[in-house]
Amino acid sequence: MYKVIDGKALAENLRSDLKKKISEYKYKYGEDIGLAVVLVGNNPASQVYVRNKIKACEEVGVKSYAYYLPEETSQNELEDLLHSLAEDKNIHGILVQLPLPKHLNAESALKIIPFEKDVDGFSAENVGKLSQNAQCLVACTPNGVMKMLESENISVRGKKAVVIGRSDIVGKPMAMLLLNADATVTVCHSKTQNLKEECLQADILVAAVGKAKFVTADMVKQGAVVIDVGMNRDENGKLCGDVDFDAVKEKCSYITPVPKGVGPMTITMLMYNTYIAALRSRS
Ligand code: GUN
C-alpha cells in the first residue's frame, strides 16, 4: 500500500501557521515584511508564477512590491532597480523571476541581491553555506521537499537517496539537503550510465528532470519514497510530473502527486524564506 503525500494540504497548514507568525512580527516591530518580485518581459509561465507568488503574499500577510518591466528593459535599468531594492529597508526579500529575456545577463543581475535578501537561495553565499550545513536561505523547492518528508516522519538518515537532475535550482540543493540530513546521495543526470540501476537502489527517489513520465515503474524499488518535482504537460496537454504516477505508485511506500504535490510547497517556502529574512534583519 502506498500513501500519497498531499502537498496542497501541507502547504495550507504551513501558510496558516506562517500567517500567525507574520502577524506577531508586525505587532512586535510595527512594520510590514516586504517581498519585491521582479518580472521582465511577457513569458506566460513566468506571469502565472509571479501572480501566484503575489497571491501567496496576500494570503500570509507579506507586503508585495511587484515590478513588471518591459521586454526591452536594459541591463542597466534592471541593475539600477536591484541596487535600490538592495538598499531599501522595507524590502526583506528580492526575487527576480527566471528566465530573463535573452539579451539580459542573469548572473550579473542576481549578484546585486544581498545574500540576506536572496529568498530564492541562489547566491554563492547561500549555496556555499548550504554546503557547509550552516544557517542560510535554502532554495524553495528542495526545502519544500524536505518539509514534505518531515511531515510524514520519513527518516532520511542512512538511507540511499537518488536525485535525478543536477540543476542549480533543484537538483544540486536537493542533494545537499539530503546529504546534510545524513542520506547517502547519488545525483544522476543526462550523462549518467545505467540510470535504471542507479534508481533501483533508491530508498528515496527525487525526480527533477523536466520530462513527462520519465520515471517508470521498472526504475523504482519496492517500498521506495518517490518525490516528483516535475511540472510538464502530457500528450493531451494535461499537467503531469516526471513520474509515471499510475504505474509507479503501486511500488511506493509514499509518492507525491502532480499537481497538488511539491508545487504548492515551493511558494510556501518562498513565504517562509521571506519571513526568515525579515527576522534575521532584526537580529
Ligand atoms: N523560475 C522557475 N523557477 C523559479 C524559482 O524558483 N525562482 C525564480 N526566481 N525563478 C524561477
Image (cartoon, helix red, strand yellow):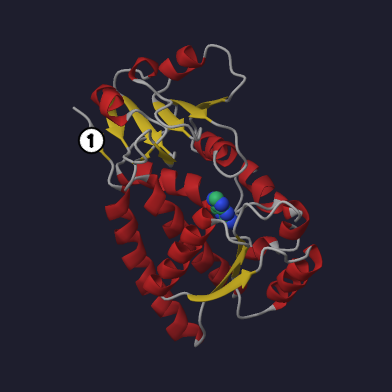
Decide if residue 214 is on the left or right side of residue 185.
left
Q: Residue furthest bottom?
A: 30
Q: In x, y percent, where is residue 153?
A: 31, 41
Q: In x, y percent, where is residue 101?
A: 68, 55
Density class for disc 1 (Cα within 10 Å; few <14, some 14-19, many ≥20) is some
In which quadrant of the rendered image does the N terminus lie?
top left
In which quadrant of the rendered image does the C terminus lie?
bottom right
Decide if residue 38 is on the left or right side of residue 271.
right
Which is nearer the eye, 203 or 261? 261
User: Which amino acid type is marked by label 1?
Assistant: Lys
Which is nearer the eye, 126 or 41? 41
Q: Which residue is mark 1?
A: 3
Q: In x, y percent, where is residue 46?
A: 53, 57
Q: Is any atom of residue 138 visible in this view?
A: no
Q: Quadrant of residue 73?
A: bottom right
Which is nearer the eye, 228 or 232? 232
Residue 35 against residue 212 in the figure, above or below:
below
Q: In x, y percent, where is residue 238?
A: 34, 41
- Residue at image location 54% in from the left, 41% down from the top: 170
Residue 240 against residue 106 in the figure, above or below:
above
Q: Residue furthest left?
A: 1
- Residue at image location 41% in from the left, 67% down from the top: 56
Q: Residue furthest right?
A: 76
